[in-house]
Amino acid sequence: MNLRATLKDKKRIVVKIGTSSLTHVETGRLNLTRLEILVRELSDLRNQGKEVVLVSSGAIGVGSAALGMNGKPSHLGQKQACAAVGQARLMMIYQKLFMEYNQMSGQILMTKNTLLDDLNRYNACNTFQSLLEMGVIPIVNENDTVSTYEIQFGDNDTLSAIVAALIGADLLILLSDIDGLFSDDPRTNPQAQFIDEVDSLDEHFLKMGKESTGSKVGTGGMATKLSAAKIATSAGADMVIANGRDPHVLHKIVEGEDYGTLFAAKPKEEFYLLDYIKNM
Ligand code: GLU
């Protein structure tokens, strides 16, 4: 059977959206139109009976715009202060929009320590499980106000893959500012070929990952997306990288339409999440 067509049957879906897709480039302020479409799409996936988790970036970006800063600050303390303001603002808006669709949402903030510590990890897993059983959409971010350089994930691509592995999701969708995986960076090489499907994420594909992000506000480039794909597919989830410019792609992807790059799950019997987290 065609792999795309099997996406219809996915039951537990993690969707990650990056800062560049959530905000206007010119001002760094929230793109409310896009946010509304995202929330409606996620609510509709819930209405189809699917369990949905949103991993949303934007805390630092939204906070720095709210505080009138010109771009993201580079100083850690200031970043954390921006995150404190921005995360609360983001959640306020998400909850308002989800309420319009009669949909419950809740916040889960994680640090690397949450996952390294057995008891914390076990508790986090239980919280996800209970929220999903109650029909709530968990909205996840890194706890940027307290994570410091030594313990931070740094990018939500990796965090979303870890969440997908932790809760046994069967699909992870990364909404980014690029259409998917290309054989080379399409911003600098017009000959770059678009890759529709990756059956096995070997060295050939991993080499296509570029460290940098093209966005001024996002953190993860293609390299972090490919390492997220490694985690998600080894844990048994399919993963799609698609352009978040139009969040309507969400239902199209889940209906099996050809959007973005699809990475096929390759569950590894020896997959052990802690090994990935410790090596980060
Ligand atoms: N946790 C960061 C934030 O909310 C984003 C990390 C990322 O861009 O992946 O601002």
Image (cartoon, rainbow, N blue to C red):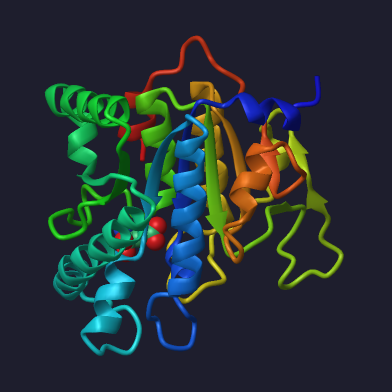
Query: Which image quarter: residue 182?
Result: bottom right
In the picture, which quadrant includes the C terminus?
top left
The percent position of residue 148, horizontal first and vertical second, equals 17, 56
Left or right position of 83 against 277: left
In the rendered image, the vertical position of residue 165 relative to residue 174, given as above or below: above
Residue located 57% across and 27% down the image: 10
* Residue placed most toward the observer, 170 or 44: 44
Q: Which of these two is toward me, 95 or 64?
A: 95
Residue 136: image quadrant is top left
Q: Nearer the viewer, residue 202 or 245?
A: 245
Q: Total number of numbered labels? A: 0
Q: Position of residue 162 (x, y in %)?
A: 38, 35
* Placement of 40 over or under 47, stated as above or below: below
Ligand 1, what quadrant?
bottom left
Q: Residue at position x 32%, y 32% from top?
A: 135
Is 220 left or right of 190, judged from the image as shown?
Answer: left
**Outermost residue, top side:** 269
Who is closer to the viewer here, 10 or 18? 10
